[in-house]
Amino acid sequence: MFAYNQVRVFAPATIANVGCGFDVMGLALNEPGDEIVATRSVDPGIRITEITGDDGLLPTDPQKNTAGIGILQLWEELGLEGGLDIEIHKKMPMGSGLGSSAASAVGGVAVLNALLASPLSNDKLLPYALEGERVACGTPHADNAAACLYGGFVLVRSSDPVDVVPIQSPGDLCAAVLHPHIEILTEDTRRILRKNIPLSLAVRQWANVGGLVAGLLKSDYDLISRSLPDVVIEPIRGVLIPGFDAIKHNALESGALGCSISGSGPSIFALCKGAEKAESSGKAMQETLNRLELESDLYISPVNQNGPQVLERS
């Protein structure tokens, strides 16, 4: 069943929610991301032999590791023999709102899939990647994982059962992503959310989701811009990010189509038409943090239409 002995795979970071699409929309980036290496072994079992870039925080037990659990379950489901040695190289910030756990989870199933002579479809792989998300946060949210696995934009129409709809998007759509060097725990950002919202806000929010999907499919940048605003989640979470209102204002003044929080934060993204606008919007966003004397990373990326990529195999 194997075609190769060793494979190295890159799995990309993602933006979840994408403004109005709380828990139901996501998109993949070209950078940053994680790299996973899998090497076949005659010794039976799945072993995580090395993890870098995690400051010693991640477990090497495959049952407790976001990359390891998907590999382990897929290995058992396929009835594969022998063993596998896994290296996980974290090349993106953890707890950033950029889908770090999803990148590892998807990278794990993608690297095993790349070893096979008859690779499985993304639809077959997604449930195993979601097990990694379950290990990471207790709930198998599909917005980051599906975007990472499929590439491009995705709409998660349902989580139970999982129903993911890839969405075409304009080829020159780019993102500027600002990652402030602060920590915001996902559980804290969910804890502060309201349990009930006014019907008027709900109507505006789902109208924006519909408008965003239509704008992407039609390459209608004005409609994309009008539809990105998040009137439910962002007003609550934005207060946790220093300078958020000014960052968003400066991104929009620099020509961004829209600006919002990536996932649960603290990263902030701006969608733009073209790389030049993304560069100028990104610099304007970062300058705001510089004035607050906060360090940050800035990533400029088109929408990654490919998902995980095989870097090496032998």
Image (cartoon, rainbow, N blue to C red):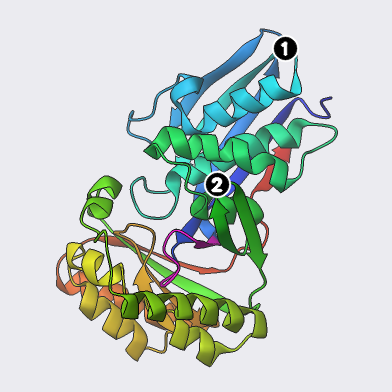
Q: Amino acid at mark 1?
A: Gly
Closer-to-camera residue (143/41): 143
Image-quadrant location for residue 44: top right
* Residue depicted at x 38% and y 29%: 58
Can residue 183 be seen here?
Answer: no
The percent position of residue 118, horizontal first and vertical second, equals: 85, 35
Q: Which residues are magenta?
A: 18-28
Q: Which mark is residue 82?
A: 1
* Residue depicted at x 68% and y 58%: 306
N-term mark: 1 or 2: 1
* Residue depicted at x 85% and y 32%: 117
The percent position of residue 63, horizontal first and vertical second, equals: 49, 21
* Element type at mark 1: loop
The percent position of residue 53, horizontal first and vertical second, equals: 40, 37
Asked if residue 199 lies left or right of residue 246, the reply is right
Direction top: furthest residue: 43
Residue that badge 2 annotates: 160
User: Which marked residue is nearer to the observer: mark 1 or mark 2?
Assistant: 2
Asked if residue 281 lies left or right of residue 224, the reply is left
* Residue depicted at x 66% and y 28%: 74
Q: How far is mark 1 from mark 2, CA to CA?
A: 34 Å
Q: Is residue 209 above or below residue 45?
A: below
Can residue 166 be seen here?
Answer: yes
Which quarter shows the C terminus?
top right
